Amino acid sequence: MHAVFKTDKGKIREANEDFGGVFFNEDDQLLAIVADGMGGHQAGDVASRLAVEQMKGYWESTRVFTDVKELEVWLETVVKEVNDDLKDHAQNNEECKGMGTTLIAAAVLNNEIVVAHIGDSRLYHVTEETIEQKTTDHSFVNELVLQGHITKEEAESHPRKNVLTRALGTEEEVNVDTLSYEWQNDTYCLLCTDGLTNKLPDEDILHIVNRSMSNEEKVDQLLEEANQRGGEDNITVALISLESGDQTWT
């Protein structure tokens, strides 16, 4: 298994409010996390960093997981605990009032990917020929798409595209989506913030991920391409492949 994580502040933003990483528990099981903070100057990066660091701490102290359902329940429970932590921090720090973050966390359990997420950061399953978004965006425009009011194409340019319907730290209680799926050799699990997907359509992501280069070079190429197309937002990518190789994260 080979995992690469990288984040870039983009070409316009003064600060990087994205955060994440690749982490391992006591039995060397992998958890990748990507978070996209919001809430204005400083508060957004506090929210994403706090959420990731709290979840990292929980993960690194866990025992081995052997059951997919058990892991789904653990992820959902921990994300809800992180939500409580964010709310407490905001209440005790006036400068962080109103902060929040998306969060997507993907754990590898043998040949299964187990996921918990909230917000519009995404997880894709990528094969040699296909790319499939496994998560559902928790956003206003995606609700319009699901209800048949607008098309996916219209959603791309909708003026309220960035309005979320769910985020960590913004509500007393959160509804966390969980899912799991089986993956095979020579396939990829890609986690990313909307700084990537707002600039690169799925077909371009598929093309880059399947280029003949190292996984680190693929992630670099994704970040570079998003920046070349404007780079108005922070850009974060975690790429996991089921193949031989060393774990890598930046």
Image: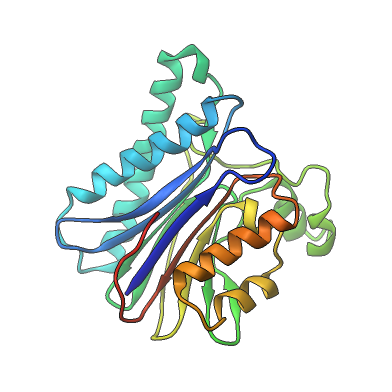
Q: How many marks?
A: 0
Residue 216 position, x and y percent, is 45, 67
Q: Is residue 211 left or right of residue 62?
A: right
Residue 41 position, x and y percent, is 59, 24
At 38% from the left and 52% from the top, the residue drawn is 21
Residue 114 position, x and y percent, is 37, 65
Residue 221 position, x and y percent, is 59, 66
Q: Is residue 231 left or right of residue 160?
A: left
Q: Nearer the viewer, residue 32 or 115?
A: 32
Q: Is residue 215 left or right of residue 207?
A: left
Quadrant hosting residue 210: bottom right
Q: Nearer the viewer, residue 42 or 147?
A: 42
In the image, is residue 1 above or below residue 141?
below
At 38% from the left and 30% from the top, the residue drawn is 84
At 71% from the left and 52% from the top, the residue drawn is 143
Q: How is the image coloured?
A: rainbow
In the image, is residue 103 above or below residue 89?
below
Q: Nearer the viewer, residue 1 or 160?
A: 1
In the image, is residue 31 above or below residue 133?
above
Q: Which image quarter is the N terminus in?
A: bottom left
Q: Which image quarter is the C terminus in?
A: bottom left
Quadrant hosting residue 57: top left
